[in-house]
Image (cartoon, helix red, strand yellow):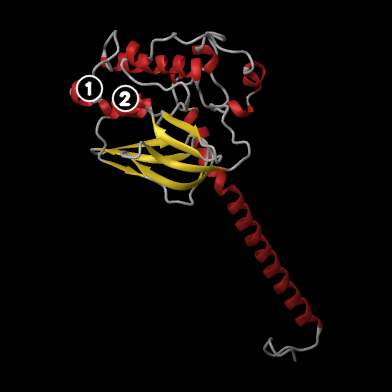
Amino acid sequence: MIPIVYEWHWDMGHFIFMGLLYAVLTVVGVTLSLALMRAHRNRHRAAHILWEESFHDLPPSRVICRYAFSGRAPDKICDHDFDCNTCDFHGLRKTTPDRETSGDKSTRALYGYDLDLDLMYDRGHTWVRQEEDGTLTIGLDDMAERVVGPIDEVILPPVGTELSIHGQGFDIVKGKTHIRVLSPVAGQVIATGSAADGWWLKVRPSADPPALDHLYSGPTAERWSEEELKLVEAHLGLDRSPFIGKKNLPAAFPNTDWPTLWHEFFLNV
């Protein structure tokens, strides 16, 4: 008798029964192990999968290719989830410069909002600065701050959180509206900031060098910001920039459907 099996007998029936039992237990164990491994591997892809689904729900006017609003491919729509880092079309053209900026006139002088052309900008209205130690600092761009106005609360991810490009970055709470701000980079959150700091997240990138081709700077950032300005003007029914002299657009235009504009502006669907 085997001690761990009650009433075990050395006969063919018991051998077959126990063989089948342990075979089933082995299959179940292996299946569960593979499922856990797959879940762990796909955990970091969940945010990317959600972004892919969200991207395809965006209207055509919100998925214009970077080379369309720069005039180099006028009718092109992005079909790559804004992932310039792996886009062949971008790879063939990124070494050719875009047309020049508006010269010595800043966007503040032209349109009323700040745009530091030395920073990198994401389509979700965050800016990114690469620090000397290789980390990335993330803030909300000036146009976005003016469109939202005073913020009630910012919900930041805990230090140690792994971010993915265009996955969940942080949330802005404005009244009863929650606005999802997309992460402009992939990496681990190493510090959180505040409005007083002038930035919201510091991230250690997950790759060296980090994937940043999808971000805009210089002339490309300027052309993109002009397209975003058109969105705001159209929503407000204006033919001129509403930003000139105004830091708080919701207060300046109180009868506007701001939640709808916020969600479109920040690529929320």
**Residue drawn at (47%, 11%) of the image:** 101
Q: Residue 159: image x %, image y %?
A: 45, 51
In the picture of the structure, the residue carrying the numbered disc 1 is 256
Q: Is residue 260 visible?
A: no
- Which badge, 1 or 2, is on the more N-terminal residue? 1
Q: Residue 37: image x %, image y %?
A: 63, 56
Q: Is residue 173 left or right of residue 49?
A: left
What is the quadrant of the N terminus in the image? bottom right
**Residue drawn at (40%, 14%) of the image:** 226
Q: Are marks 1 and 2 in contact (CB under 8 Å)?
A: yes
What is the quadrant of the C terminus in the image? top left
Circle 1 Cα neighbour tier, 10 Å, few/some/many (<14 / 14–19 / ≥20)? some
Q: For residue 180, which quarter of the picture?
A: top left
Q: Residue 212: image x %, image y %?
A: 56, 30
Q: Is residue 155 left or right of residue 56?
A: left
The CA span between labels 1 and 2 is 9 Å
- Residue type, mark 2 in image: Leu
In the picture of the structure, the residue carrying the numbered disc 2 is 261
Circle 2 Cα neighbour tier, 10 Å, few/some/many (<14 / 14–19 / ≥20)? some
In the depicted structure, whether residue 18 falls above or below residue 66: below
Q: Residue 247: image x %, image y %?
A: 25, 24
Q: Is residue 246 left or right of residue 66?
A: left
Nearest the camera: 77 or 29? Answer: 77
Q: For residue 140, which quarter of the picture?
A: top left
Element at badge 2? helix
Nearest the camera: 165 or 264? Answer: 165
In the depicted structure, whether residue 221 falls above or below residue 239: below
- Residue type, mark 1 in image: Thr
